Image: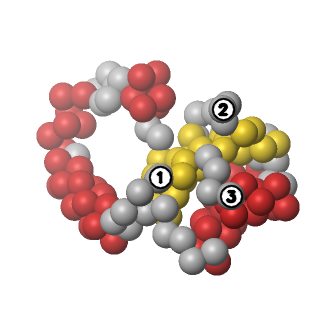
Amino acid sequence: MPIKIVNGLNETEIDALLRTKASFIIVGLRGQFTKSVFKVEKNIESLGLKCRVISDYKGVAAQGGAFGVFGAFVSTSMLPILALTAASYTAHKLATYNPDYEIVKDYINKKIIVNYKSK
């Protein structure tokens, strides 16, 4: 079955998809990207389900390289920040252990991917 595409923040359609525990993609958000992620997250939690919000940075890394042109300089000066980021990422994974839904923020394509994680 193909994944459902929701155009814009159609709250009625999104709510119906969440209630049936379906996976879907939200496109056409324009200036409402962050607000839309927050609304979907709150919708999921209002149904008594857990969710994890993550960002898709693979597209960014593929377009510009992991460190870019100044990789050698950046890699040494950014080690403390990278260590803190890794620690907070691990804490976030533990806090949202075994979620019902995973919300993926795709900044490059301006879409939100909402995946139901069957248990």
Decide: is 84 above or below 25: below
Q: Earlier in the sequence, mark 2 or mark 1?
A: 2
Q: Is residue 23 visible?
A: yes
Decide: is 86 above or below 45: above
> Which quadrant of the rendered structure holds the N terminus?
top right
Point out residue 71 in the picture as x, y percentages from the top left corner.
25, 28
Residue where numbered disc 2 is placed: 1
Residue where numbered disc 3 is placed: 20
Cα–Cα span, label 2 and label 1: 16 Å
Q: Quadrant of residue 49?
A: bottom right
Query: Mark 2 belongs to which amino acid?
Result: Met
Side of 20 relative to 88 (left or right): right
Query: Mark 3 belongs to which amino acid?
Result: Thr
Q: Nearer the viewer, residue 22 or 104?
A: 22
Give me the residue at 58% from left, 34% from top: 108
Element marked by disc 1: loop
Side of 80 relative to 48 (left or right): left
Q: Earlier in the sequence, mark 3 or mark 1?
A: 3
Answer few, some or many: residues within 10 Å of disc 2's Cα (few below 14, many 20 plus, some between 14 and 19): few
Point out residue 27 in the picture as x, y percentages from the top left corner.
74, 40
Residue where numbered disc 1 is placed: 117
Q: Nearer the viewer, residue 90 or 21?
A: 21
The colour style of the image is secondary structure
Query: Mark 1 belongs to which amino acid?
Result: Lys
Side of 26 relative to 100 (left or right): right
Answer few, some or many: residues within 10 Å of disc 1's Cα (few below 14, many 20 plus, some between 14 and 19): some
Give me the residue at 69% from left, 63% from top: 19
Point out residue 100 in the picture as x, y percentages from the top left corner.
49, 62
